Amino acid sequence: MRRLALLLALSAFVAACSSNSPTQVPTSQLTFIHVAPTAPPLANPADSFWAKKGENRQIQIYFRPAAGMVDSALFLEFKVDAQSLYKRPDGTLIADGDSVLIHVTVSDPVHLIVTFQPSGLQFSMTKPARLKYEFLEADNDLNSDGVVNATDTTLKAQLQLYRQETTGGLWSPVSALIDTSIDECNSDIYGFTNYALAY
């Protein structure tokens, strides 16, 4: 009886974990943020950097300065701390002093979808990489009905960070802190490849 009770408890635990697993949705079921018509183009929509285990490294992607302005607006910042690198795509552990070339590409500059490579690179569960995603240059007319109103405010509150494992595949929500008062999203990143904000 004790063994049966243990098996039933284990089954209930597995079922609970399964029911709490992230919902995967196709692209057609998501509405992605999009850049405002007045937004300047990105200055470096594709860029690369060497992440090195044992050192803090980062990359930033900016919009070009708006007309009449000197400063650029930050779009994306990706940080890899000294102990963030964990496994290569082939499954081999990354040793101290080893480096990995990381490519960051804004693959859809209209909907600000970002692709990170190499696909399959894994980061530490205790010291993950960190993504900051600013959407100040996104259109506040989220539903594209020609007017910015309370409906758009409601939709903005529903924004989530999504991850797409392979291009053309399903999207999964990712835990993130989204502050709509400053149009900023921050999230721990444990692996690659595509990321975007949508509702």
Image (cartoon, grey):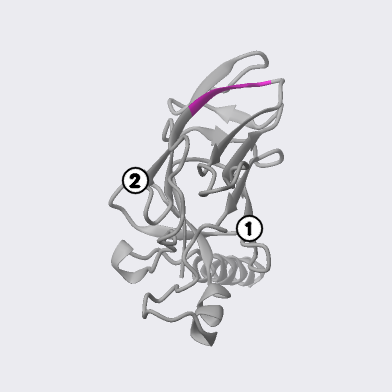
Q: Based on the displayed image, in which of its 4 quarters is residue 84 positioned?
A: top right
At horizontal 68% and vertical 68% (from top left) the residue drawn is 181
Magenta stretch, overall SS: strand
Q: CA distance from mark 1 to mark 2?
A: 25 Å
Q: Indicate left or right for 31 with 184 as reference.
A: left
Image position, residue 75 (x, y; %):
55, 47
Q: Indicate left or right for 136 with 172 as reference.
A: right
Q: Based on the displayed image, in which of its 4 quarters is residue 87 positioned?
A: top right
For the N terminus, give its image quadrant.
Answer: bottom right
Q: Which residue is mark 1?
A: 184
Q: Is residue 158 magenta?
A: no
Find the magenta span and give its range.
48-53
How many C-alpha atoms fall within 10 Å of the one at disc 2: few (<14), some, or many (≥20)?
some
At horizontal 52% and vertical 40% (from top left) the residue drawn is 191
Image position, residue 166 (x, y; %):
34, 45
Vertical arrangement, residue 80 with respect to residue 96, above or below: below
Image position, residue 17 (x, y; %):
56, 65
Query: In the rendered structure, which amino acid carries the disc numbered 1?
Result: Glu
At horizontal 57% and vertical 58% (from top left) the residue drawn is 136
Residue located farthest toward the top when viewing the structure as drawn: 97
Q: Nearer the viewer, residue 181 or 99?
A: 181
Query: In the rendered structure, which amino acid carries the disc numbered 2?
Result: Thr
Q: Which residue is mark 2?
A: 166
Q: Nearer the viewer, residue 97 or 79?
A: 79
Mark 1 element type: strand
